[in-house]
Image (cartoon, rainbow, N blue to C red):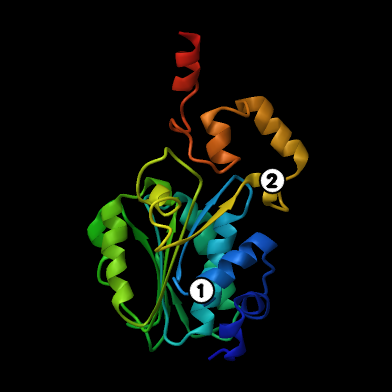
């Protein structure tokens, strides 16, 4: 079991237990998620901010520092989670004090001898029923690309908050101004701590890249607003000609 000091300082825990350094914006998220009163954090961030990186690091920190622990990482599709977040998570946990005590499966990582109450699992949430039934004294729910997730999924997952130390982290680029993810940044601020991180707040994104995106998409385009400025555009981020442009032309 990790020292209690790491429960009081998640940034220190990420550094010492996971051997990972997180940038200032990610540090804000970590502290608010694990030390804040709401224990539910919604992050809208632009390209290059480090969303997948943050999920992997915080997931590993949570899993290593609590005993037992259940970590659920969910998305509508497996491609990004399995290729980036899941691989990083497995390596980080395997190199911790739990080394030699883990059983790896394609979508699950379990502590040998504690398989029923100490595990990490990737879940597809195309079906809201897949979000039900997870309970633990220490539970972390993570939803990647939350903008495309149906409200029924969030409602199903919320059943876990009736007991224990439960935490909920959702991250995404922005889509149209509707849906549950959008509401966590507007009408549900009494329930969620919301963070807004445009791409230019990331230490991984330089001015040249921002300029290139402006040139490619146009600073006023829905694509730029959603993927770089991390704003909710009036239209979807796949729209080439915004409705407002057509209205002004008429």
Q: Can the viewer see residue 160 in this picture?
A: yes
Q: Position of residue 8 (x, y in %)?
A: 58, 84
Badge 1 is on which residue? 36
- Residue nearest the viewer, comparing 249 with 41: 249
21 left or right, relative to 241: right
Q: Quadrant of residue 175?
A: top left
Q: Nearer the viewer, residue 187 or 245?
A: 187
Q: Is residue 146 above or below residue 9?
A: above
Q: Nearer the viewer, residue 155 or 213?
A: 155
Upstream in sequence: badge 2 or badge 1:
1
In front of the other: label 2 or label 1? 1
| Residue 196 circle label | none
- Residue visible at 38% across and 87% down? 114
Up the image or down, 4 lies above or below 130; here it is below
Residue extending farthest top:
250
* Mark 2 closeness class: few <14, some 14–19, many ≥20 residues within 10 Å: some
* Residue 242 vertical position relative to residue 129 in the rendered view, above or below: above
Q: Position of residue 125 (x, y in %)?
A: 32, 55
Residue closest to the eye, 166 or 119: 166
Query: Label 1 crowding class (10 Å Cα cut-off): few <14, some 14-19, many 20+?
Result: few
> Residue 181, image x and y in percent?
40, 51
Q: Residue at x 27, y 60 (%)?
A: 155
Q: Secondary structure at mark 2?
A: helix
Tell me the residue that label 2 is attached to: 200
Residue at horizontal 53%, vertical 91%?
Answer: 1
User: What is the x, y in percent for residue 72?
Assistant: 39, 68
Q: Residue at x 30, y 49 (%)?
A: 150
């Amino acid at each position: 079991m990790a020292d209690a000091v790491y429960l009081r300082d998640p940034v220190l825990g990420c550094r010492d237990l996971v051997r990972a350094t997180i940038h200032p914006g990610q540090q804000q998220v970590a502290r608010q998620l694990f030390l804040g009163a709401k224990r539910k954090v919604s992050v809208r961030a632009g390209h290059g901010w480090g969303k997948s990186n943050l999920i992997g690091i915080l997931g590993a920190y949570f899993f290593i520092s609590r005993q037992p622990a259940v970590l659920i990482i969910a998305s509508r599709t497996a491609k990004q989670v399995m290729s980036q977040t899941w691989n990083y998570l497995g390596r980080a946990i395997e190199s911790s004090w739990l080394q030699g005590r883990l059983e790896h499966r394609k979508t699950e990582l379990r502590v040998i001898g504690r398989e029923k109450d100490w595990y990490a699992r990737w879940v597809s949430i195309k079906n809201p029923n897949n979000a039900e039934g997870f309970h633990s004294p220490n539970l972390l729910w993570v939803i990647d690309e939350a903008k495309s997730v149906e409200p029924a999924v969030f409602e199903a997952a919320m059943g876990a908050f009736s007991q224990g130390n439960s935490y909920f982290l959702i991250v995404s680029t922005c889509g149209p101004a509707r849906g549950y993810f959008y509401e966590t940044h507007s009408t549900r601020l009494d329930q969620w701590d919301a963070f807004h991180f445009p791409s230019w707040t990331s230490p991984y994104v330089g001015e040249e890249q921002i300029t290139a995106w402006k040139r490619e998409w146009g600073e006023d385009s829905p694509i730029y607003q959603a993927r770089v400025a991390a704003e909710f555009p009036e239209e979807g981020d796949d729209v080439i000609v915004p409705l407002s442009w057509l209205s002004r032309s008429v």
